[in-house]
Image (cartoon, helix red, strand yellow):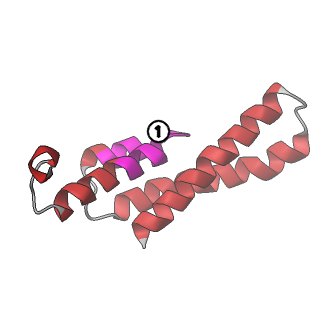
Amino acid sequence: MTVRALRIAAGVELASLAVLLTNLATVHWPAVSSLIGPTHGCAYLLVVICAARVREASTRTRVTAAIPGIGGLLAVRQLSGATTFRRNSGRTPQENC
């Protein structure tokens, strides 16, 4: 459940950052900033907390999750690579072919 929550929170974090930057570059409506800003902040905190709670996460993955904006997606990518490696009984991808 935590990896799934991490994946969702990472997507929300990236999407909210895109909305904030688009708003800043175009019309700069204060209402958009006041609505999306806290959403982005909560999503960022949720990404960091979820990454810290995943048992398979290495220290590198946990630190990567703390990068604002894209860190959550990078952490999900690192975790999916670790899960795939573990699922293949410890064999390298070249040995699985």
Tell me residue 20's x, y (percent): 74, 39
Tell me residue 74's x, y (percent): 41, 43
- Element type at mark 1: loop
Q: Tell me how many marks there are.
A: 1
* Residue at image point 46% right, 66% down: 4
Residue behind mark 1: 67
Tell me residue 70's x, y (percent): 51, 40
Q: Nearer the viewer, residue 39 or 11?
A: 11
Q: Is residue 41 magenta?
A: no
What is the residue that sits farthest to the front in this orientation? 97
Residue segment shown in magenta: 61-77
Position of the N terminus, as image quadrant, is bottom left
* Residue at image point 58% right, 52% down: 11
| Amino acid type assigned to the residue bearing label 1 in the image | Ile
What is the residue that sits farthest to the bottom in this orientation? 1
Tell me residue 30's x, y (percent): 89, 40
What is the residue that sits farthest to the top in this orientation? 25
Q: Examine the rendered structure and indicate whether residue 1 appears above or below residue 28.
A: below
Q: Is residue 84 left or right of residue 89?
A: right
Q: Examine the rendered structure and indicate whether residue 70 appears above or below residue 26.
A: below
* Residue at image point 43% right, 61% down: 50
Q: Is residue 73 magenta?
A: yes
Q: Residue 89: name its quadrant.
A: bottom left
* Category of crowding for the residue at label 1, using alpha-carbon neighbours closer than 10 angstroms: few (below 14), some (14–19), many (at least 20): some
* Residue at image point 40% right, 52% down: 76
Majority SS type along the magenta span: helix
